[in-house]
Image (spheres, grey):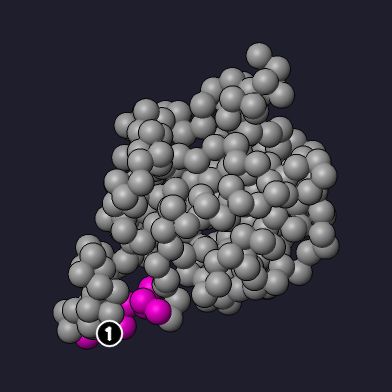
Amino acid sequence: MSALEANRLGRGPTGRAPGAGGLARSVTLLNAFRHEGSDPDEFGRVMAADTVDILSRYCMLEGRVVVDVGGASGYVAEGIRSAGAASFTVEYDPVEMSLGDHRFTGGVRGDGRRLPLATGSVDVCYSSNVIEHVDGPALMMEEMVRVVRPGGMVVLAYTNWWSPWGGHETSPWHWLGGERAVRRYERKYGREPKNYYGRNLFPLHIGDVLRWARSKREVEVVDAFPRYYPRWCSPLVAIPIVREAATWNLALVMRKRADG
């Protein structure tokens, strides 16, 4: 199978489906995600390895220029560099730049809604677990598309609002309302949650994001799947309403058209 044929099938140059790895991979990812706050170093290492695995199934990383938008202290960019790419991070929050024992290197501070990058300057623009924290997610998605060269890839993953972890540390009470979930958290723990509904955490739905992507002339949707689940769970994304609650985290892969 050629790389072109594989990409047309939503698979990488190896012909393997992204997200392969079965239940063991899912358990590892979900466990790391749950302990992001208490063990950011392990979370960063796990996510970096999985990111390299996913990206390499859609394009050859060696020799490419890759930007990780909202990549915190740079774990993912570091992992991508180990695969032979020139990779750097754009991070907005200075607190996120020094998670655990890892310190921010190989990047710049910048807003995902106004990326400090020239149009068509990178081969791959990637972001994970960031866009649900952005007030104005469409602006960030537009920017991710803008900075990618024609033929390049945009890979976006995020926690959708109605998923079991949509409210982050206030979950699952966000199902009863984001503000109510925040108030319950404050009563129970005597402090504000890090991810505060309406301030730095906003409802983002799978249907809305897919409609946005499919409406953009500049890109074609290559794939959409639940990032943390085994590959056989991918059909969930095609089922309206069900996907909003059953999909823990959506991964969306887009290719910028040659005339984009």
| Residue in the picture at 66% in, 61% down | 142
Q: What element carries label 1?
A: loop
> Which secondary structure dominates the residues rendered in magenta?
loop
User: Residue 20: where, in percent of width, then height?
Assistant: 45, 28
Neighbor class of circle 1 (other Cα within 10 Å; few <14, some 14-19, many 20+) is few
Most extreme residue toward the left, as rendered?
A: 188
User: Residue 149: where, in percent of width, then height?
Assistant: 80, 48
Most extreme residue toward the top, as rendered?
A: 1
User: Residue 232: where, in percent of width, then height?
Assistant: 37, 28
In reply to whether residue 192 is colored magenta, the answer given is yes
| Residue in the picture at 78% in, 64% down | 117
Q: What residue span does the magenta drawing correspond to?
A: 190-198
In the image, 195 versus 1, the foreground residue is 1
In the image, 228 versus 139, the foreground residue is 139
User: Residue 93: where, in percent of width, then height?
Assistant: 56, 75
| Quadrant occupied by the N terminus | top right
Number of disc labels: 1
In reply to whether residue 68 is colored magenta, the answer given is no
Q: Is residue 117 in sight in this rendering? A: yes
Determine which residue is flagged by label 1: 191
In the image, 5 versus 20, the foreground residue is 5
In the image, 179 versus 216, the foreground residue is 216
Q: Is residue 124 in sight in this rendering? A: no
| Residue in the picture at 23% in, 65% down | 175
| Residue in the picture at 64% in, 56% down | 68
Residue type, numbered disc 1: Arg
